């Protein structure tokens, strides 16, 4: 499926790097939570890296994505920087949102990430609207709307898919089906087939192995190119798995999923291990080169964490700033 | 000066702003060829085409969400919500998304959209087509709320709303669509947060919003005939609120009635009354009185509906009592 591995080595190594960056970011975020250094909770993307990376590597900087409560992966994959992300997670002034959004609202305007969203399904309208404005303004930008299997139960999706299909909007709805919404199995909340729901609106729907970054990327590449030409919208269901609990505090999970199941996904279907094996066997990179890359990313992440821990909180005077665009202090 | 209806005034405001700025577009149900059930938008699709006057399916949360995303990415949507009562359907997109995006992103993203809808009872439309729900959105930080009280106001406030970089909700009084008022041919804008003193007075201040501005003006006529001089003020926007103008009038007349068509409890009248109590207490000769719509769902029967909203006679009656000192409830 992947063409000419060696000629495209740079692209493949970047994909690998981005997946490892996500995993490493999450490991650090988890540690920050466990050591009580992070305010609040956060939702880990670990296990789902091939989804965000496979898709975002098919996008340009000016293309938009909307993200979810489990959004660190989308943010990294769309080009975000560790320091500003960790600062945001810790509520620091140098965070992407000056500490006002936190993990569940990270937005990175400069890379076209319109923001994570703490309302399940809440960004489906926003993504469709971003595609609408691209069309109105005559730009060929594409928007990818990330959401979970749980979000497919929200009525908003059906409303906006209808309009996106009627108006041929350049939007790709990407359902990260990790098998659970919180503590409930997808089978219990989704009747019938999820792809058939998109097809009911005349939207071309695809299923892909979300643990296979090359498959995800190849599929998305084609759909993005077609969406740019006005052939959208599209729907992709990506079968994947989250390694951690629903959030970092969800430790005892056996009442809703077995340890065996978790073990099977981690040991036999890990997207990073799989891709690494492929890179080595195709001669794109050596084990040593990969180890070096991993180590460098680890270093980067620890340095960013240290930086964020030492960074300052926003001044309390910021509390009533950014309520309105044209009023410096809303309560002054 | 020429006189035009409120409906024509809104139409002109939209047409002028759409000519001025290609990123402005209208989205909603039956906005194009039909020009909305109230015919406010007639003629716009002929000039601007269906790409900028966009008919949607009946999917309020959907097209509201699309407008939020469009606003975040370089366009200026004017969302047409056919009845104010349908605002409940768009609450997540309006209050969780649009209102908070600028703040949550630390000022990086903004949502320059206008949600135009309406308010007002006594059209015999019963409980789901008659509500005045502006207090609901005024409660949410990040939303501006404009309440035009005439054709002149509707045009000037709409143009300002479209140019504003924040989400603005503008409620038109649907009973006023055919009411005419002098509207200059020349372009004008009405800034937000600047109250309009319609009539100066010495004995009592009547603060009215939207549909209730006319009610207050008529009450002032009744009172004038009895020798009571009432000042009538229209805040024009409740977010931002021209608190200084309202306080100045309260200090001057020392008696205030606040009249608004939203339900009285937990509403606009309560908020304004409370600010006056907090900041002008020692200037007052009587408690600030609230007059909102009755705290009941709007009934269909004319016999019932008409008694649920403040009337000029009712306002005048309360004003008389305040002036005579009859409404001071010493325990
Ligand atoms: C409207 C809404 N309802 C409920 C919640 C609580 N909640 C947060 S995440 C979640 C599960 C979402 O599942 P899914 O869409 O599959 O995403 P995943 O967490 O699996 O990535 C729920 C129910 C919420 N945040 N918003
Ligand atoms: Mg899920």
Image (cartoon, coloured by chain):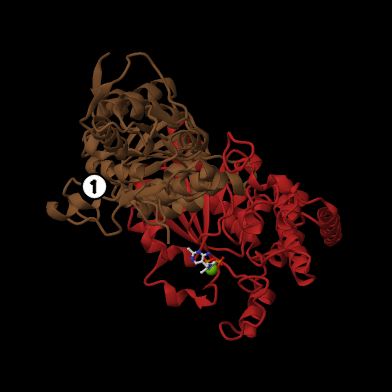
Chain colours: A red, B brown
Q: A23 and B170: which one is in front? A: B170
Q: Position of residue B216 (x, y in %)?
A: 30, 37
Question: In the image, what residue occupies the spot 70% across and 51% down?
Answer: A99
Quadrant of the frame with the C terminus of chain A: top right
Instruction: Report if the beta carbon of the residue with label 1 is closer than 8 angstroms to ligand 1.
Output: no
Question: In the image, what residue occupies the spot 32% across and 33% down?
Answer: B149
Q: Is residue B56 visible?
A: no
Say above or below: B207 vs B2.
below
Q: Is residue B137 left or right of residue A200?
A: right
Quadrant of the frame with the N terminus of chain A: bottom right
> Within 10 Å of the Cα at label 1, are there few (<14), some (14-19), or many (20+) other Cα atoms?
many
Q: Is residue A57 visible?
A: yes
Say above or below: B210 vs A114.
above
Residue that numbered label 1 is attached to: B121
Q: Which quadrant holds residue A21?
A: bottom right
Q: Is residue A301 left or right of residue A11?
A: right
């Amino acid at each position: 499926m992947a063409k000419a591995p060696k000629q495209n080595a740079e692209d493949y190594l970047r994909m690998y790097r981005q997946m490892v960056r996500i995993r490493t970011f999450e490991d650090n975020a988890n540690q920050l939570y466990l050591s009580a250094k992070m305010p609040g909770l956060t939702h880990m993307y670990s296990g789902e890296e091939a989804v965000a990376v496979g898709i975002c590597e098919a996008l340009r900087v000016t293309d938009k994505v909307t993200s979810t409560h489990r959004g660190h992966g989308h943010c990294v994959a769309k080009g975000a920087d560790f320091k500003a992300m960790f600062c945001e997670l810790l509520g620091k002034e140098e965070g992407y949102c000056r500490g006002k959004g936190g993990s569940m609202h990270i937005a990175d305007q400069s890379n076209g990430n319109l923001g994570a969203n703490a309302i399940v399904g809440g960004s489906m309208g926003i993504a469709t609207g971003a595609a609408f404005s691209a069309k109105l303004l005559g730009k060929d930008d594409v928007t990818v709307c990330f959401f979970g299997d749980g979000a497919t139960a929200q009525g908003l999706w059906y409303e906006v898919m209808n309009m996106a299909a009627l108006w041929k909007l350049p939007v790709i709805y990407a359902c990260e089906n990790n098998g659970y919404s919180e503590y409930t199995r997808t089978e219990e909340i989704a009747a019938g087939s999820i792809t058939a729901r998109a097809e009911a609106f005349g939207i071309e729907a695809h299923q892909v192995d979300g643990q296979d970054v090359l498959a995800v990327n190849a599929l998305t590449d084609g759909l993005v190119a077609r969406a740019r030409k006005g052939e959208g919208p599209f729907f992709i269901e990506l079968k994947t798995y989250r390694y951690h609990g629903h959030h970092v505090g969800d430790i005892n999970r056996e009442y809703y999923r077995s340890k065996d199941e978790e073990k099977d996904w981690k040991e036999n279907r890990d997207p990073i291990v799989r891709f690494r094996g492929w890179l080595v066997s195709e001669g794109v990179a050596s084990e040593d080169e990969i180890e070096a890359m991993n180590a460098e990313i680890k270093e980067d992440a620890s340095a960013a964490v240290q930086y964020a821990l030492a960074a300052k909180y926003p001044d309390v005077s910021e509390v009533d700033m950014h309520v309105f665009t044209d009023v410096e202090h809303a309560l002054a | 000066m020429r006189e035009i209806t409120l409906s024509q005034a809104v139409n002109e405001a939209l047409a002028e702003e759409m000519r001025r700025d290609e990123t402005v577009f209208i989205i909603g149900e039956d906005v194009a060829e039909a020009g909305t059930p109230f015919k406010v938008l007639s003629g716009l699709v002929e000039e601007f085409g269906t790409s900028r006057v966009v008919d949607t399916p009946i999917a309020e949360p959907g097209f509201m969400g699309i407008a939020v995303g469009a606003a975040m990415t370089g366009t200026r949507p004017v969302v047409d919500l056919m009845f104010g009562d349908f605002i409940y359907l768009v609450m997540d997109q309006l209050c969780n998304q649009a209102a908070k995006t600028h703040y949550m992103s630390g000022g990086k993203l903004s949502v320059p959209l206008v949600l135009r809808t309406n308010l007002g009872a006594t059209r015999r439309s019963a409980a789901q087509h008659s509500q005045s729900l502006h207090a609901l959105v005024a409660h949410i930080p990040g939303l501006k709320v404009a309440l035009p009280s005439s054709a002149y106001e509707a045009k000037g406030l709409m143009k300002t709303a479209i140019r504003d970089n924040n989400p603005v909700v503008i409620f038109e009084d649907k009973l006023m669509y055919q009411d005419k008022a002098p509207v200059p041919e020349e372009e004008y804008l009405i800034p937000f947060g600047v109250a309009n003193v319609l009539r100066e007075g010495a004995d009592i201040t009547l603060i009215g919003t939207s549909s209730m501005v006319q009610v207050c003006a008529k009450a002032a006529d009744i009172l004038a005939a009895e020798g009571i001089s009432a000042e009538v003020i229209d805040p024009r926007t409740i977010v931002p609120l021209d608190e200084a103008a309202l306080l100045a009038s309260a200090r001057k007349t020392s008696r205030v009635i606040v009249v608004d068509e939203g339900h009285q409890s937990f509403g606009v009248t309560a908020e304004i009354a409370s600010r006056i109590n907090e900041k002008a207490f020692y200037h007052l000769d009587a408690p600030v009185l609230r007059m909102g719509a009755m705290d009941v769902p709007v009934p269909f029967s004319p016999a019932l509906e008409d008694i649920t909203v403040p009337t000029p006679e009712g306002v005048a009656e309360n004003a008389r009592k305040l002036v005579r000192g009859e409404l001071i409830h010493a325990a």
